[in-house]
Amino acid sequence: MFPSTSPEAGRESWPAGPQPGPAAAATRGQPPAPRTGPATTDGDRRERGGPRRARRAGEPARRSEDEIDEPEEEVIPPVQVHRQLALTIAGFAALLGVGLVLGAQTSGPGHRLPFAFIIFGVQLLFVLAWTMAMRPPALLVVAGISAAVAALADIAAVQTDVAGLAPLGYLAAGGFLAAVLGQLVRRVDRVRVTDSLGATLLIVVGVVAFGTLIVLSRIPAGTQAITVCLTASGVALTVARLTDAVLPWPRLAPQVPRGAAGVVAGAMVGTLTSALLGSYLVAPFTPTRAAVIGLVAAVTAVLSDLAVGYAEAGRLMAGEPPTMWVARHMQGPLGGFALAAPAAYAMCMLFL
């Protein structure tokens, strides 16, 4: 039997349009042909963008949007060096050095109290200057504890059977701990205790450092070592400040009114002075040994004085109000002699 439907049913019919030939297959995968239209001239482009404004004479050219304006670095003007102030500080350093050296000459076996009183007076000046300049929390508490530690350190340096630094070290640690605990009492001061630990430590250790001069005076050749080291320190500080009054160049920092010439000249003249003293002193001193210990003391004093200047400039740049004028400028020489004292003790133990 034959099916009722024809075999052509269900098949798709051919499209009525022309079938794709080999020409159409050849253009497959090729880029499309460019569009045809009226050509655009430069004049048309200018008309579309509008007329350009002519640049006037003297008018700067426009910057493109791609250029980024970089901020210019702010130039900080250098701080002016006051000649009269530098001369005043130099005079104070010279007087302080002369007082300490002459006080050391009054010290003798069984006769240490006059020198101890002189040291205690210098310690009180140190406490006044450094507490007023650095202003730690609970200022009166720190100042009172530091003064008490200074008195106890002088008594221990005079009364102990064996001359040594161990009692002074214990007093420094106890005084620092007491000062920190005193700052923790008030809630207002408690917030700033962490930031002021360094200032409190410097004040307490500084007053104890002067006590090493009394201990050194009890050691053979200690008085001569004090004379050499403190003379070198005093001369170095004085010459450095005098040079700053005349030639504060080259400036170490724009914010610090000090020059490198003064620092170098002070250390050199202080070393030369100690070598000259060594040629007049008796054994075990020689010009070479005196020059070595004088160099260490002079460099220590000058760098300490310079560090005080940097610290003061940092406080002013941080926005802190300036403190008492006299205290700020006494701080440098007092700090220099405070660090020169243990340096003199160490050099005496090592070289003499």
Image (cartoon, rainbow, N blue to C red):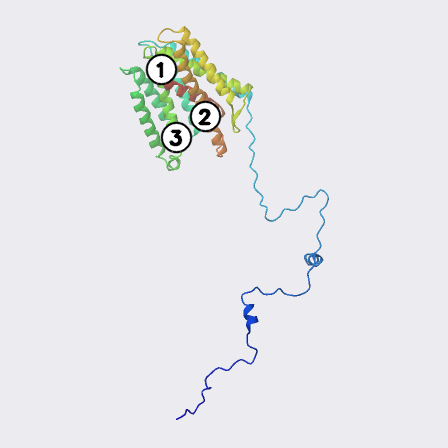
Q: Residue type at mark 2?
A: Val
Q: What residue is at 36 percent from the left and 21 percent from the top?
A: 209
Q: Residue furthest left?
A: 161
Q: Residue type at mark 1?
A: Ala
Disc on the earlier residue, 3 or 1? 1
Q: Residue furthest front?
A: 22
Q: What's the mark number on residue 198?
A: 3
Q: What's the mark number on residue 216?
A: none
Image quadrant assignment for residue 69: top right
Disc on the earlier residue, 1 or 2? 1
Crowding at dot 3, Cα within 10 Å, few <14 / some 14-19 / many 20+, comes out as few
Q: What residue is at 36 percent from the left and 24 percent from the top?
A: 205
The reply, left or right, for residue 16 in relation to residue 305 is right
In this view, the mark in front (1 or 2): 2
In terms of depth relative to the viewer, which is nearer, 104 or 247? 247
In terms of depth relative to the viewer, which is nearer, 34 or 279? 34
Counting labels gives 3
The alpha-carbon separation of the residues under discs 3 and 1 comes to 27 Å
The residue identified by callout 1 is 116
Residue 114 on image: x %, y %: 36, 12
Of helix, strand and loop, which one carries label 2? helix
Q: Residue type at mark 3?
A: Gly
Could you tell me which quadrant the N terminus lies in?
Answer: bottom left
The alpha-carbon separation of the residues under discs 3 and 2 comes to 13 Å
The residue identified by callout 2 is 308
The alpha-carbon separation of the residues under discs 1 and 2 comes to 26 Å
